[in-house]
Image (spheres, coloured by chain):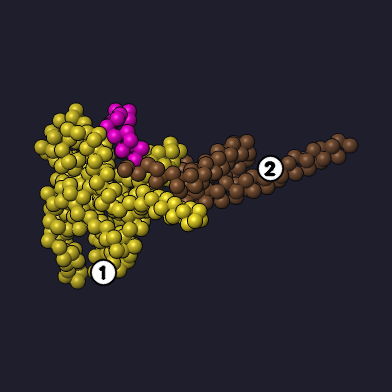
Chain colours: A brown, B yellow
Amino acid sequence: MRVLVSMTAMTTVLLLLVGCASDFEKRYAEAERMRMLAADAGAEWLQTEKLVSQAKKAAARGDMERASALLEIAQFQAETAIMQAQHEADAWAGRVVQ
Amino acid sequence: MRKAIAAVVLIGTTLLMYQTVFAGAEEDRLAFVKYYKTRFPDIPFAEYANGIYAIDSDARGQWLEIEEFPPYEFAVEQGQEWWEAVFENGKTLADCFPQQLDEIRVSYPRLDERLGEVVTLEMAINQCRTANDQPQLTYGGDEIIDITAFLAYQGRGKELEVRVPENDSRALAAYESGKRFYYSKRGQLNLACADCHVTSVGQLVRADRLSASLGHTTHFPVYRSKLGGMISLHKRFAGCVRDVRAKPFALQSTEFRNLEYFLSYMGNGLKVNGPGARK
């Protein structure tokens, strides 16, 4: 019985870990995609690439909580940079010295 | 009838908007000069070639003292040696530049007819090296900065006269791209070049006053005391972009070359006084 319980527990933990890693990979790919979009628009922020890279390193050493937090910031930065570029597509003209 | 009136109004509005956004380069320059003249009525136009020292009288005194023993002199001397160095084929850099030595600095940036893009002095130097089977110099490296320091020194006193030919769509596009870059907010701080150097010009950022963009390009390359060495204009651009917490473009990237084209045109009529010395 004990063996069965510990095997079940181990399997659950393993499944959870695999699930976290898989979820992280998806979020990592999305953050990286958004960062690249910001870069293509010439609008990437200074720290975004570093944040994505640090997130990957944190995940590699199993610190999923930190990895997730870093990815969240990177994703936010990339999305905001894209919005900034979209807004500036027209807004810049309003600042030209007349 | 209503439709005709609406069409006329629409066309008129569109043309007005087009004119506002795509005003001619000379119109932009005159507005730029007028803006600073209004902002600092006591500062003569020619003074803007001195950058921040045109408007910061406290720092100006220290700068004048530094200029008594210019820290960029070594770069100028070294640059002359590089300039006169003979390639394996017996030619030198001078063979690539048909202009008089004192005219080379003010001949750039300009639109290269063949490439259809803006060519800066640094780029022209590397084009020359490539044409003579020499490896390209690293932008931002000592050798290319020293050469530009020597050419700037030789060109002192010559007025900037950057041309944006109105009949060349490529030149106009490059100018507009530089102008757009200058006025676009970027980075985590959401600031445009113009936010600091137009809107907030003369105000303090920590202990430093913000310089006017008029004349920004006349004195480069400069010796920066805080770095203990020479830096190029594009290195300064990269520093500014980093300061607003955006990822900088590469030195001599299209973005920075177009920005240099725009800013240099704004400074037309000012005398080149590089290399300079800055804090």
Q: Are marks 1 and 2 in contact (CB under 8 Å)?
A: no
Question: Can you tell which mark lies on residue A14?
Answer: none
Residue at the spot 19% in from the left edge and 66% down from the top edge: B96
Q: CA distance from mark 1 to mark 2?
A: 56 Å
Q: Which residue is mark 1?
A: B131
Q: From the viewer's perspective, is B128 left or right of A59?
A: left
Against B207, residue B246 (above or below) is below
Which of the chains bears the disc numbered 2? A
Using a 10 Å C-alpha cutoff, classify the residue at mark 2 as few (fewer than 14 neighbours), some (14 to 19) or many (20 or more): some
Quadrant of the image containing the N terminus of chain A: top right
Quick one: quadrant of the C terminus of chain A?
top left
Is residue B118 visible to us here? yes
Residue A31 highlighted magenta (yes or no): no
Q: Observer-nearest residue: A10 or B218?
A: B218
Residue that carries the numbered disc 2 in the rendered image:
A20
Q: Chain of mark 1?
A: B
Residue A23 x %, y % = 67, 45
Furthest-front residue in this view = B1
Residue drawn at point x = 44 percent, y = 44 percent: A91
Which stretch did the figure color magenta? B194-209
Most distant residue in the left direction: B68
Image quarter for residue B128? bottom left
Q: In the image, what residue type sits under mark 1?
A: Ala
Question: From this viewpoint, which residue is outermost toward the right?
Answer: A1
Mark 1 on the same chain as mark 2: no
Label 1: element kind: helix
For residue B197: magenta?
Answer: yes
Disc number lying in front (1 or 2) = 1
**Within 10 angstroms of label 1, few (less than 14), some, or many (20 or more) residues?**
few
Q: Residue at x 14, y 57 (%)?
A: B103
Asked where in the image residue B164 lies, by quadrant, the reply is: bottom left
